[in-house]
Amino acid sequence: MPPRMKSPPIRDIAADLESRIASGDLQPGQQLPSTRDLASQYGVSEKTIYRVVSLLKAGGQVEARQGKGVFVRSTQPLEWNLHQFERGSRRDDPAVGRDDWKVTAEEQGRTATQDKPLVSVEPAPVSVARWLQIEPGTYVVARRRVRRVDGEPFQIADSWFPTAIALDTDLMVEDDVTRPGGVLAFIGHPQVSLRDEIRAWPPATPDEAKRLELSEDVGTPVIRHTRIGFGADGKPVRVMVTVAPSHLNTLVYEMDV
């Protein structure tokens, strides 16, 4: 009698269905096969398929419709045009609280909002100290935000500033502050050059998953975009780390060659 083949684990089945969704084999709005059919297809119990579907629901890939079944969720990623963001003539509009990032979303017909920032003065972690070219443990001003698109968390945007620049300025205000040309320029420390560092980082950490309202069990892959801004003297004036779930964000660069 041939040895019995081991059934695929829950995460492998979920990954296969996610791959089919990403490739377009399963289209947005399309109903998934029945639990019985999926169980037969993958050679597992219906109970296992229930757990797979729970993972896909938690990750935002599918949604259940009462009395109808489970359907592929229609997720429209945001195109984040990094070659334009914070560059040149900014499009901030303090009169309506619209900053450069919100304009990017609104140009795509989306509604952009930002949760109330959390501001603190704290010792710089090693990575932040390296980006800001200071000694680890040096006190910095931290400003932590969650950015939403159409009401859903799309990005974490955490920034750190040297205290000599940020203390007793608008950067300490725990509100959605918008200033002409950006807050740094408004307080006399404009960014004149930028450096971007981009890494894939699967999965989101438990803290990131909580802030982004993701299920910790799913292991959602995220993109980490780090932007260091430099002043006229060549010294860093800010570092911002944006954590973006990969299925909700498309990073875009356009340039002449």
Image: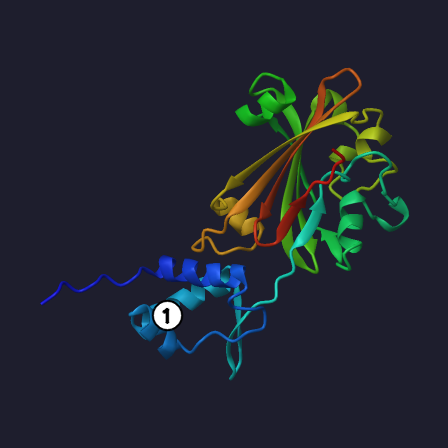
Residue at 77% x, 49% y is: 104
| Secondary structure beneath label 1 | helix
Residue 167 location (% of width, % of height):
75, 26
Residue 250 location (% of width, % of height):
64, 49
Residue at 32% x, 75% y is: 40
- Residue annotated with mark 1: 49
What colouring style does the render use?
A: rainbow
Q: Nearer the viewer, residue 125 or 89?
A: 89
Residue 221 location (% of width, % of height):
50, 48
Q: Is residue 176 visible?
A: no
Amino acid carrying mark 1 in the image: Ile
Where is residue 1, by image quadrant? bottom left
Q: Is residue 203 above or below residue 35?
A: above
Residue at the front extreme, as displayed: 257
Residue 64 location (% of width, % of height):
52, 74
Q: Nearer the viewer, residue 21 or 249?
A: 21
Residue at the left extreme, as displayed: 1
Within-10-Å neighbours for mark 1: few <14, some 14–19, many 20+: many
Q: Is residue 122 visible?
A: yes
Residue at 74% x, 20% y is: 164
Question: Position of 61 compared to 114: left or right?
Answer: left
For the C terminus, the quadrant is top right
Where is residue 118, by image quadrant? top right
Residue at the right extreme, as displayed: 95
Give the tally of numbered discs.
Answer: 1
Residue at 88% x, 45% y is: 93
